[in-house]
Image (spheres, helix red, strand yellow):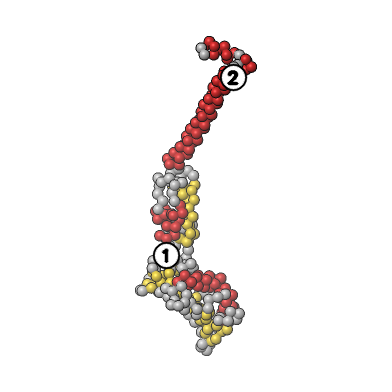
Amino acid sequence: MSSTEEKKSSTKSRAQLTPRERQRIAEKNRKRRIRRKRFVIFSFSFIIIAVAAGIVWAFITVFKITDYKVEGCKTYSAELVFKDSGLKKGNNLFFSRLNSAEEQLEKKLPYIGNAEITRLIPGTLKIKITETYKVCALKYGGSYLLLNRDGKILSRETGKAADGLPLLACTKPVNPNPGNIIEFTAVKNGKSGQEILEIYKNLIAAIETSKISPVTTVDISDPEDVSIVYQNRITLIIGAPVKLDSRMAFAADVLASENKISKTQKGEIDLTDINKAYFKPLTEN
């Protein structure tokens, strides 16, 4: 068909078109719609890619660590906390692994009980520290391991650092390095090291709850025959470490009564009956 004829056919009404002409026009319109659809998809995809590229560029080049602030830490300097976190200025704020940094701080700086790191846009890290504290001392070689209430080894110190702390009697520890949770040697045909650790944690928690103080010895060397010593003069015989909170409460009441009578009397408090507590004096007043 010539251009003149095509022009003429375009001015015809649809009713005047031949089947062949209608088919050709329909095919032409279909291709036009396909081209329009492809253009829309391409344009939309280009915009999405451009936006994504802009976000990535912003993340990489704009949101860099430029500053930090440390809260709640008295034992270590802010500079040391940031250094030992493994995080660095200039690194991307969002690509930095904060969970790993928190775990590293709690390991490398033992007196950090919990570290929580959050991002402050555009480039600051906030490091919130909750410190832990020593509650017990374990003689190890010529020095002492200082432990917190969860059995975390805080430091290895000379005798003076252990002054005022209860001395822990227990099975030999394994891998006793600061920052580690203490690992107790398992008792032959008895409790595992993990079970002994749970006994330690539960006993320390019960002592703190009962407010029995000062405790001079905590003995878990036989995990089925546990005892503690109060003021280096009264032994609390616990036996099997069950229902510790109620038994320590009994002991606290007995100690309060005995202290009203004498603050020097030596003796034993039998707590092996989980429902009662008996005081047995060992010396005369």
Name, please, the residue furthest toward the front. 19
Q: x, y (%) of residue 104?
A: 42, 57
Towards the viewer: 217 or 256? 217
Q: Residue at x 47, y 65 (%)?
A: 133
Disc 2, SS: helix
**Badge 2 density bin: few <14, some 14–19, many ≥20, Cα 10 Å:** few
To which residue does mark 2 refer?
19
Q: Which residue is drawn at 42% across and 54% down?
A: 85
Q: x, y (%) of residue 253?
A: 59, 78
Q: x, y (%) of residue 252?
A: 57, 77
Residue 67 numbered mark, or none: none
- Residue type at mark 2 is Pro
Q: Distance between the residues labelled 2 and 1?
A: 87 Å
- Residue type at mark 1 is Asn
**Among the 4 quarters of the image, the one containing residue 21:** top right
To which residue does mark 1 refer?
180
Disc 1, SS: loop
Q: Residue at x 39, y 70 (%)?
A: 174
Dot placed on the residue nearer the N-terminal end, 2 or 1? 2
Tell me if residue 242 comes above or below residue 121 in the rendering.
below
